[in-house]
Amino acid sequence: MLKEFQEFISRGNVMDLAVGVIIGAAFGKIVESLVNDIIMPIVGAIFGGLDFNNYFFGLSSNVHSATLADAKKEGAVFAYGSFITVVLNFLILAFIIFLMVKAVNNLRRRLEREKPAAAAAPPADVQLLTEIRDLLAKK
């Protein structure tokens, strides 16, 4: 069983997947910071200087705080502002990944166009007819 596990781990695509997950997690933190620290304050300033993370309403009569962190300590809250922020994170991340995939696809297409077209071998019947023609021409 240990040998099978070593074979599984040593495969290239497993390592590629692990690297992709690690880089994706780090990239997700970058996007989260971009949204929370740059985009959302600008959007909040446009819409009256409010922080979307503190958009909530209490589901309990005990909730009276103005900030989400304090309100969660007082009772259940419906934090729709945090949800808006997470959705915006997702949309930005999805758009960036779309642009990356599009760039890779464009690069692949350009490389395919730049490759010299390999001479395609003629079909077997054409090749056979060519051989017959050449043999008849020699007689």
Image: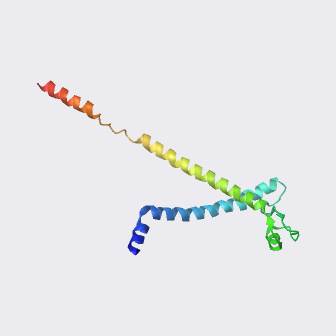
Residue 117 picture quarter: top left
The answer to which of 99 and 68 lies nearer the viewer is 68
Relative to 75, 135 lies left or right:
left
Relative to 7, 78 lies left or right:
right
User: Which residue occupies 43% across, 40% down?
Assistant: 113
Can you give x and y, in whole percent of width and height, for residue 44 in the image?
80, 57
Residue at the outermost left position: 139
In the rendered view of the protein, which quadrant contains the C terminus?
Answer: top left
Residue 139 to residue 67: above or below = above
Can you give x and y, in whole percent of width and height, for residue 112 in the image?
43, 42
In the rendered view of the protein, which quadrant contains the N terminus?
Answer: bottom left
State how many labels appear.
Answer: 0
Residue 35 picture quarter: bottom right
User: Which residue occupies 58% across, 49% down?
Assistant: 99
Relative to 102, 129 lies left or right:
left
Can you give x and y, in whole percent of width and height, for residue 66 in the image?
86, 67
The answer to which of 108 and 94 lies nearer the viewer is 94
User: Which residue occupies 56% across, 51% down?
Assistant: 100
Residue 136 to residue 49: above or below = above
The answer to which of 114 and 63 lies nearer the viewer is 63
Q: What colour scheme has been applied to the protein in the rendered image?
A: rainbow
Residue 56 picture quarter: bottom right
Can you give x and y, in whole percent of width and height, for residue 87 in the image?
70, 56
